[in-house]
Amino acid sequence: MLLSRTSYNWAYSEDIPGSRCGPEDGPWPRAYQVLEENELWKELNIMARPQTRSLETSATSSNERGWRADMINFQPSPTTRTQDRYIVTTLDLHGQKWTLTGVFDGHLGDATVEHVAHHLPIIIRDFMRDALANATPSTITPAYISELFSKAIVAFDDAIAGDVLDLFGGIEGLENFSDAQIRSIINDRHRGGANWQKVRLCMYGTTALVALVDPEHQNLWVANLGDCQAVMVTSRGDEDGWNVEMLTTNHNGDNDAEVERVRLQHPGEPECVIDRRVLGALAPFRCLGDVPFKQPPEFTRRILYNLLPGFQNTSPWEEFLVRNRTPPYITAEPEVTHIKLDEDGQDSEKSRRRRFLVLSSDGFTDLCSGEGQKRIVESWAREMDERMTLNEKEAQQHQHHQLKRGPLGPSNNMALRLLRRALGGEDRYSVSRVLTLDMEVAWIDDTSIIVQTL
């Protein structure tokens, strides 16, 4: 609970960052509470639930380089459950530890995004473990890993619909079952619900942004589906000089190349993309799940419509199903980018440079739309550099003392600091508006951020 908020103020829709809150959400102005600094940080910690994880690899088993990841998942509306998820883990591949981090932005519901966040790392680990066991050192190139990474993600997505279709002998086998028989098979919650859970995953979807770092910390692979973003932030070595490099492109209707790709795959179907949405309904052009856009209409009508509790209204589904003629219309094949990291970690000039990988859902991009993402990230990076440099100096003076929650301390989580910078930084009024606005529905998009040191 908040303590002794000092004052109240009034906000208009244009004062709220992002695109979720608009004039139609009136009446305006709406009240918000102005927080003192200590209250503001307390509330940010409660709402964003910051976490820190050390990322040691087989090449740096003692983690002497301090590799780490900080992460948050933020939604200030107390009545709204966030549909974002993130992962930060290590994969043990034949005794070597690879780092895997990722951000997922679910839509329609959270069943699929929850499944993806839990099971995708396992599938990637098992897929790569099996492939690398049979590969020779000369074949394990960056391109080979890129292909493995992509194939693992596609195979994971194929299984979502495949596990359901196997119950009926494939899509063609549905004609051998009555609706009553289908309902009996898939609505098995009284028998443990295994089939019911499989079918539920097909109703929803999620974008995916996953980053993989090799044990030697020489290579980074970023696999992207949808509109989450990966940004590399690197100091140039000169004072206040930072490179902010976007590593991903958005796979949605704002990307003309994605629109053209779908149109070329479905010639003679002018309604495959309407108003820059797939079949006039779905915003992302690449994602996991969303099976109604990947399977023929009978999958939805015969299987999903028979899942209980049933659809109260199928008309929104029928609006795009009547356009579904030659699926799939969206793909789970990610765009994989490989980045060569600095090989000479002993170089004194390079070792003084900071490098951060920022993975974020589109909620962060939305928050940055006013001031601009590049400017926000650059100013945040300068602050992090100053704090980390000060901490390193103090650590050298007090080597016997180590902070358990990481070198920046619990209140200085890098991802939480970046979130605050996007919300308004040192402007307590701007940050307080987002945290305490008197609204009954969510007034900003779900926002997940991972900051990983490289």
Image (tube, rainbow, N blue to C red):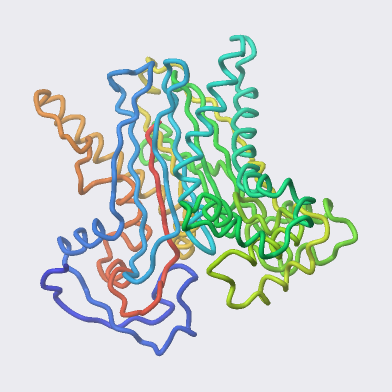
Estimate the x, y position of residue 154 in percent, counting from the top left.
Answer: 64, 39
Position of the N terminus, as image quadrant, is bottom left
Instruction: Give residue 401's quadrant in the image.
Output: top left
- Front position in the image: 385 or 4: 4
Lateral position of residue 400 relative to residue 335, left or right? left
Q: Position of residue 308 (x, y in %)?
A: 55, 66
In this view, the residue farthest toward the right is 268
Please state which of residues 23 and 115 is positioned toward the viewer in this rendering.
115
Q: Quadrant of the rendered structure where residue 17 is?
A: bottom left
On screen, residue 264 versus residue 399, left or right, reads: right
Image location of residue 161, percent across then percent down:
65, 49
Q: Quadrant of the C terminus?
A: top left
Image point (55%, 60%), residue name: 187
Q: Is residue 426 left or right of residue 173?
A: left
In front: 234, or 225?
Answer: 225
Report the front residue among 371 and 452: 452
Which residue occupies the extreme bottom position in the image? 27
Residue 303 as seen in the image, left or right of residue 352? right
Residue drawn at (48%, 36%), measured in percent from left and top?
121
Identify which residue is drawn at 46% across, 65% down.
370
Q: Is residue 299 above or below residue 162?
A: below
Q: Position of residue 34 (x, y in %)?
A: 22, 74
Residue at position x 57%, y 71% in the image: 310
Q: How many marks?
A: 0
Vertical arrangement, residue 124 with respect to residue 371, above or below: above
